Amino acid sequence: MRKKLLLGNWKMNKTIAEAKEFACLSLEMAKQAAKNNIDIGVAPTFLGLDVIKKNNPSLIVAAQNVNENDAGAYTGEISVPMLEEIGIDWVIIGHSERRMYNNETNASCNKKIARLLKSHMTPVYCVGETLTQYENGETKSVVYEQLSVGLKDLTKDSVKDIVIAYEPVWSIGTGKNASKEIAEDVCAFIRSTLKDLFGEDVAESIRVLYGGSVKPENIHDYLTMPNIDGALVGGASLKLDSFQAMLQNIIK
Ligand code: PGA
């Protein structure tokens, strides 16, 4: 049975002080999630990682990116050993905003994922089609390419704890969430692709999330679908009350 997961992606929001406040005020929520066998966490900016980890150790704390090299002349980058030093072992990889603004590709995501798995860390690998690709009926071929290249040459054993997030680009931050049927159809396709690539046991153990305009009002619907194991949430994860409401609506 796959454990449900609610992960907030804060993007470039919240100062250190704001992140600390959220961490302190979410202690009770984290306990409630644990009691209900649900994983919850947030992905702040690099600057917010340490303060959240220290003030609410029960939350999963994920970075939003990492460099595949351990050290060197890579201005503006952060490496795996640097994250390990502050106890961070989850990282979002290949978010569509990074693909769009930072030229990340399936091949560069593959290097980052391989580096994370080498250190037994958990990548949350984001896949999903643009509006044009959706309108042209290319969703599955795009997602197939993102998976087959992004997860290339990884071993069955190392890949089993990875998380995949299906985030149609047209639904991110637009308020136009994909219907639960569309999301389930693609998440089921992701699972069957994982089965082709790594076998049934691995495909059944990997959590697949939906992301894109998830909010308290629609999260429950997604979580009732057999191949959707949780949500990656942007805007609605920033306020404590809506984060709390999403958790409640998963539990109910
Ligand atoms: P959104 O963002 O919930 O604001 O649409 C989701 C994401 O980018 O992960």
Image (spheres, helix red, strand yellow):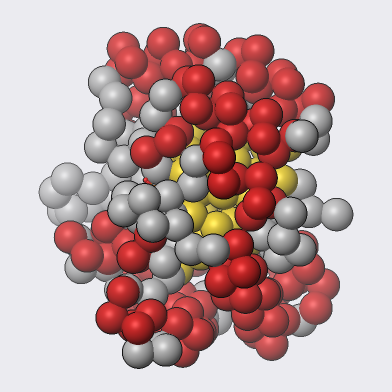
Find residue 120 and report its horizontal and vertical position in percent: 61, 52
- Above or below, comparing residue 148 to residue 245 in the picture: below
Looking at the image, which residue is at 72% across and 60% down?
225
Q: Is residue 89 visible?
A: no
Depth check, front residue: 119 or 102: 102
* Residue at left offset 37%, top offset 38%: 235
Q: Quadrant of the N terminus?
A: bottom right
Q: Please state if 12 lies on the left or on the right of 121 as rendered.
A: left
Residue 69 higher or lower than 248, as above or below: below
Looking at the image, which residue is at 35% across and 25% down?
A: 48
Q: Position of residue 44 (x, y in %)?
A: 38, 33
**Residue 87's spot in the image, x, y percent?**
52, 31
Q: How many marks?
A: 0
Q: Which one is in front, 197 or 207?
A: 207
Q: Position of residue 99 (x, y in %)?
A: 27, 65
In the rendered image, the quadrant that contains the C terminus is top right
At 71% across and 46% down in the image, what residue appears? 4
Task: Look at the image and tell me whether residue 227 can be seen.
Answer: yes
Indicate left or right for 130 with 145 as reference.
Answer: left
In depth, the one of 87 and 169 nearer the eye is: 169
Reply above or below: 191 against 49: below
Quadrant of the image occupied by residue 251: top right
Left or right: where 117 falls relative to 5: left
Extreme residue toward the right, this view? 1
